Image (cartoon, rainbow, N blue to C red):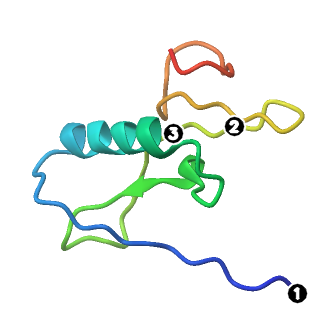
Amino acid sequence: MSPPRWVIHLPTTLTSLEDATALAVALRDSLGHLTVIDFGETTLSEEDRQSLRTRVWCDTPLGGPGRCPRLNAHPGTCALDRS
């Protein structure tokens, strides 16, 4: 059995889903080189509704080690680029 993974809950003062998503994107862009952070599993929630989470990225497996890095519910097909 593998040891449990830990989740960091990072509250913000942001008041919109769009701004929180933009912050998640900025964090991934600046910290994406750290292999200890699984950005594909990033979710957002309102402070008082933390059990209701919104996925940030699609994260669909693409065969091999790659997963789709595009925003969740993106148009078109999945791909390895972020556009």
Measure the alpha-carbon separation of dots 1 and 2: 25 Å
Labels 1 and 2 touching (C-beta < 8 A):
no
Residue type for callout 3: Trp
Residue depicted at 50% across the width and 14% down the height: 83
Residue that carries the numbered disc 1 in the rendered image: 1
Which label sits on residue 60?
A: 2
Query: Which of the two labelled residues, at mark 3 and mark 1, occupies the earlier sequence position?
Result: 1
Label 3 residue SS? loop
Q: Position of residue 57 (x, y in %)?
A: 51, 39
Residue depicted at 68% across the width and 19% down the height: 79
Q: Position of residue 28 (x, y in %)?
A: 46, 41
In the foreground, 49 or 2: 2
Which label sits on residue 75?
A: none
Q: Quarter of the image for the N terminus: give it.
A: bottom right
Residue 53 location, quadrant: bottom left
5 over 61 or under it: above or below? below
Q: Position of residue 46 (x, y in %)?
A: 22, 62
Residue depicted at 59% across the width and 51% down the height: 34
Which label sits on residue 57?
A: 3
Residue type for callout 2: Thr
Residue 61 location, quadrant: top right
Q: Is residue 68 left or right of residue 14?
A: right
